[in-house]
């Protein structure tokens, strides 16, 4: 009759530990049912669940393992597991799996306590915790640092809306971004990322910058703010704002372009996405002139934006062609995905305004980036505390992976 045994080993890590211990198990024909290992600050915690085919052999196996493990200067605990306990545990492996990602300038105990408490309240068990970011220096300025912890959880939350609302509350309370994704094949196989431009890839709203040059800055900025909050219809407000630019010299476009600043992490994110084979697109309610400049600088694959009408070197106060509003952005996202032979689940959309919500909803992973409150509450995920390159963590990439990519540039 066989016997099931859980073996937990701890102590300072060094090469060859796993080989030494499992070699003894191999000599006795043990079957591995589960195995896991974590190393924190060179201290090892190693667990293995084994089946001993012949229970009469268990005393010999334990004696040899105990001798080997003590010789390696490690601590060990043995715990017998009944067949019923094992069967119940095995059934649980069929539960839904999710990834909870914590993003901040630094991770605190309070953040982990609050988030893990919420997962427990919603019947989600943490299977694994991993650090994806690099090790923090004790002396570095953390105002620009990045810290990321990932929970792999299992279970079936009974109310996803309530779970998300609690995460959002903690996020606002503790300067923490929390992403909650289903851990399925699509999470590991995203292939297209579409971006809004203004206040997403770049820090400014271009139409506000043009308005300053035209002497109508305050009027346009107020309309822009209300439109981004979802208080005004985007297309109507857009035409009204463009109308206020009538008479502006075309030469001003180059002047404004020269002072635009890219958002933190934009260049790193897109260069890494390109190296990983992703397609990228700008779907902007802004203007083609500026989107094309950004495309050339970053190597974006697709650009769709509004064409500012200019005649005899002067802005007419109108736009040509169909306005790229919220509905059009979602439509373009679907068109690009179809052209690339992708499912919508393989698409990531990133934006900050109310007119971005349709494309954020259409994408498999919709991210409200430094967004207005309405957008942050309505989107599936939000990033408010870090730069755009933190999106790489949501793809499961570690800092060591991105460092390797940077080295290949």
Image (tube, grey):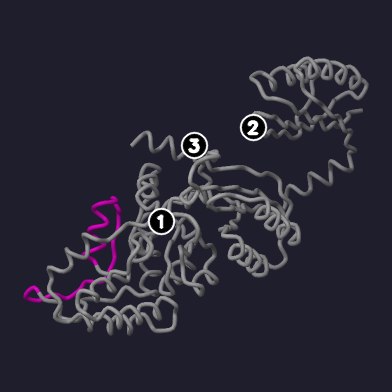
Residue ID for mark 2: 41
Residue most toward the front?
139
Is the C-beta separation of discs 1 and 2 under 8 Å?
Answer: no
Q: Which residues are magenta?
A: 288-313
Magenta span contains residue 223: no
Q: Quadrant of the C terminus?
A: top left
- Neighbor class of circle 1 (other Cα within 10 Å; few <14, some 14-19, many 20+) is many
Mark 1 or mark 3: whose residue is earlier in sequence: 1
Mark seen at residue 164: none
Residue at x-position 13% and y-position 71%:
250
Q: Position of residue 137 (x, y in %)?
A: 53, 39
Q: Position of residue 190 (x, y in %)?
A: 47, 51
Q: Position of residue 398 (x, y in %)?
A: 52, 41
Disc 1 secondary structure class: strand
Q: Is residue 312 above or below residue 20?
A: below
The image quarter containing residue 295 is: bottom left
Callout in the foreground (1, 3): 3
Q: CA distance from mark 1 to mark 2?
A: 36 Å
Residue ID for mark 3: 400
Residue at x-position 27% and y-position 61%:
260
Q: Position of residue 276 (x, y in %)?
A: 40, 43
Is the C-beta separation of discs 3 and 2 under 8 Å?
Answer: no
Magenta span contains residue 291: yes
Residue ID for mark 1: 193
Disc 3 secondary structure class: helix
Q: CA distance from mark 3 to mark 2?
A: 17 Å
Mark 1 or mark 2: whose residue is earlier in sequence: 2
- Neighbor class of circle 2 (other Cα within 10 Å; few <14, some 14-19, many 20+) is few
Q: Quadrant of the N terminus?
A: top right
Q: CA distance from mark 1 to mark 3?
A: 22 Å
Residue at x-position 76% and y-position 61%:
121
Disc 2 secondary structure class: loop
């Amino acid at each position: 009759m066989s016997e099931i045994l859980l073996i937990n080993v701890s102590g300072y890590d060094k090469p060859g530990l796993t080989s030494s211990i499992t070699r003894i198990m191999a000599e006795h024909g043990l079957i591995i049912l589960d195995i896991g290992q974590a190393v924190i600050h060179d201290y090892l915690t190693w667990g293995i669940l084994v089946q001993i085919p012949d229970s009469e052999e268990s005393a010999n196996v334990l004696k040899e393992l105990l001798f080997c493990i003590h010789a390696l200067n490690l601590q060990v605990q043995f715990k017998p597991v009944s067949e019923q306990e094992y069967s119940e545990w095995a059934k649980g492996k069929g539960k839904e799996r999710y990834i909870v990602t914590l993003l901040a300038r630094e991770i605190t105990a309070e953040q982990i306590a609050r988030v893990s408490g919420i997962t427990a309240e919603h019947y989600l068990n943490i299977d694994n915790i991993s650090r994806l970011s690099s090790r923090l220096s004790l002396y570095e300025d953390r105002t620009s640092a990045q810290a990321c912890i990932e929970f792999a959880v299992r279970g079936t939350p009974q109310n996803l809306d309530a779970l998300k609302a609690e995460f959002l509350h903690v996020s606002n309370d503790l300067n923490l971004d929390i992403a909650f994704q289903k851990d399925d094949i699509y999470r590991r196989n995203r292939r297209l990322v579409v971006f809004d431009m203004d206040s997403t890839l770049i820090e400014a709203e271009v139409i506000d910058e043009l308005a300053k040059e035209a002497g109508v800055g305050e009027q346009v900025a107020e309309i822009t703010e209300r439109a981004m909050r979802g208080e005004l219809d985007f297309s109507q407000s857009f035409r009204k704002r463009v109308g206020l630019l009538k008479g502006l010299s075309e030469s001003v476009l180059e002047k404004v372009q020269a002072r635009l600043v890219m958002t933190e992490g934009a260049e790193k994110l897109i260069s890494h996405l390109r190296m990983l084979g992703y397609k990228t697109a700008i779907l902007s309610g802004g203007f083609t002139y500026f989107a094309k400049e950004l495309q050339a600088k970053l190597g974006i694959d697709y650009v769709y934006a509004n064409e500012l009408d200019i005649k005899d070197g002067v802005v007419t106060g109108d736009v040509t062609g169909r306005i790229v509003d919220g509905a059009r952005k979602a439509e373009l996202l679907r068109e690009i995905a179809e052209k690339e032979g992708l499912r919508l689940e393989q698409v990531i959309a990133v934006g900050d305004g109310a007119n971005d919500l349709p494309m954020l909803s259409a994408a498999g992973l919709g991210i409200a980036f430094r967004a207005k409150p309405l957008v942050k509450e309505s989107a599936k995920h939000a990033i408010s505390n870090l730069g755009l390159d933190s999106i790489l963590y949501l793809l499961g990439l570690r800092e060591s992976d991105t460092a390797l990519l940077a080295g290949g540039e």
